[in-house]
Image: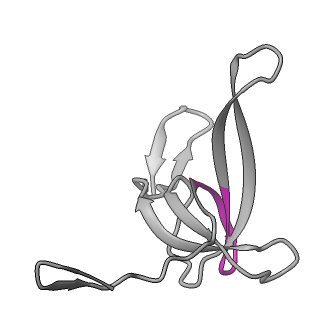
């Protein structure tokens, strides 16, 4: 602890776990989401910037994410065969469009909402 002009600073315990930011691709499993992380990297020979995408399975305890959400995931102990990450926070929620059932009449081609 360091003292600065009579005030004490408490050093927070820092985690050495990796943290990634990505987009939720799927949430069709129970308490599991699939997060796609996109990284930009220069090609070793051609020096052109390319996008590298990788999918990670993460644990979502409350099932609170939806496809399109930008989330922050943190490395954790193995939770299943593929899950090695946990949801840390939701950075940005996506705008959800409500499902509207539309029936199209084959004879007239007019859409009727039900």
Residue occupying image coordinates x 62% and y 37%:
106
In reply to whether residue 26 is colored magenta, the answer given is yes
Q: Is residue 102 or residue 110 the one in the foreground?
A: 102
Left or right: 14 in relation to 93: right
State the image coordinates of residue 85 (x, y, percent, origin top left).
68, 72
State the image coordinates of residue 64 (x, y, percent, origin top left).
50, 75
Q: Is residue 83 above or below residue 95?
A: below
Residue occupying image coordinates x 53% and y 83%:
62
Query: Residue pushed farthest top?
Result: 46
Q: Is residue 43 above or below residue 85?
A: above
Left or right: 72 in relation to 43: left
Residue occupying image coordinates x 64% and y 42%:
38
Q: Quadrant of residue 32?
A: bottom right
Q: Is residue 38 above or below residue 75?
A: above
Q: Main secondary structure of the magenta part?
A: strand
Residue occupying image coordinates x 11% and y 78%:
5
Q: Is residue 95 above or below residue 66?
A: above
Query: Residue pushed farthest right?
Result: 81
Q: Quadrant of residue 74?
A: bottom right
State the image coordinates of residue 100 (x, y, percent, origin top left).
47, 55
Q: Quadrant of residue 45?
A: top right
Which quarter of the figure is the N terminus placed in?
A: bottom left
Q: Is residue 93 or residue 12 the one in the foreground?
A: 12
Which quarter of the figure is the C terminus placed in?
A: bottom left
State the image coordinates of residue 61 (x, y, percent, origin top left).
58, 84
Left or right: 69 in relation to 58: left
Region rendered in magenta: 22-35
| Rendering colour mode | one colour
In reply to whether residue 28 is colored magenta, the answer given is yes
């Amino acid at each position: 602890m360091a003292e600065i002009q009579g005030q004490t600073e408490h050093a927070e315990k820092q985690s050495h776990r990796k943290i990634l930011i990505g987009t939720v691709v799927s949430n069709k499993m129970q308490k599991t989401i699939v997060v796609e992380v996109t990284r930009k990297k220069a090609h070793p020979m051609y020096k052109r910037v390319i996008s590298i995408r990788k999918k990670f399975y993460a644990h979502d305890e409350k099932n609170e994410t939806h496809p399109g959400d930008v989330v922050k995931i943190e490395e954790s102990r193995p939770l299943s065969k593929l899950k090695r990450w946990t949801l840390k926070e939701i950075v940005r929620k996506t705008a959800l469009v409500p499902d509207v059932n539309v029936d199209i009449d084959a004879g007239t081609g007019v859409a009727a909402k039900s």
